[in-house]
Amino acid sequence: MNKGDLIKKIAGDAKITKAQASAALESVTNSITVSLKKGERVTLIGFGSFSVTKRAARKGRNPQTGKPLNISARKVAKFKPGTVLAKKVK
């Protein structure tokens, strides 16, 4: 399922227009993004939690040439599914 498919599904389930569903989805994703940028955790009970973790600097290897290279430290977004979602997917 891609973003367009999700918008169609939201519009159909909520009986709203695709434009309204798109605006709602954009609002949700933007709100999650802003909270993560601030370092906050976003928890959707029953669905899961979004958080930001720090990935340490490490050594890597270029797969094409085999030459070693340094990978710098950075922050990454992380998602942990909630128990309800995990049970439904199982």
Image (spheres, grey):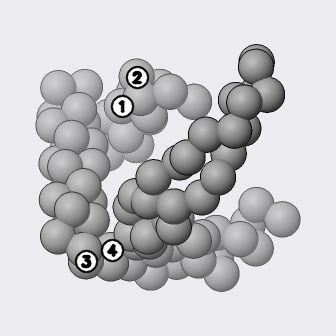
User: Hey, what amino acid is under mark 2?
Assistant: Gly
Query: Can you identify the residue that label 4 sits on?
Result: 42
**Gap in angstroms between the C-alphas marked 3 and 4:** 7 Å
Q: Quadrant of the C terminus?
A: bottom right
Tag of residue 4: 2
**Gap in angstroms between the C-alphas marked 1 and 4:** 22 Å
Q: Are marks 2 and 1 in contact (CB under 8 Å)?
A: yes
Q: Are marks 3 and 4 in contact (CB under 8 Å)?
A: yes
- Residue 76 picture location, percent across and down: 43, 58
Vertically, is 11 above or below 29?
Answer: above
Query: Can you identify the residue that label 3 sits on?
Result: 40
**Gap in angstroms between the C-alphas marked 2 and 1:** 5 Å
**Gap in angstroms between the C-alphas marked 2 and 4:** 24 Å
The residue under the point 24% across, 55% down is 33
Query: Can you identify the residue that label 1 sits on?
Result: 7
Vertically, is 3 above or below 69?
Answer: above
The residue under the point 50% across, 27% down is 2
Q: Secondary structure at mark 4?
A: strand
The residue under the point 24% across, 36% down is 21
**Disc nearest the viewer among 3 and 4:** 3
Q: Identify the image quadrant of residue 89.
A: bottom right
Q: Is residue 39 left or right of residue 34?
A: right
- Residue 71 picture location, percent across and down: 53, 48
Mark 4 or mark 2, which is nearer the start of the sequence? 2
Mark 2 or mark 3, which is nearer the start of the sequence? 2
Q: Is residue 76 visible?
A: no
**Gap in angstroms between the C-alphas marked 3 and 2:** 28 Å
User: Hey, what amino acid is under mark 3?
Assistant: Glu
Q: Are marks 3 and 2 in contact (CB under 8 Å)?
A: no
User: Hey, what amino acid is under mark 4?
Assistant: Val
The residue under the point 44% across, 71% down is 53
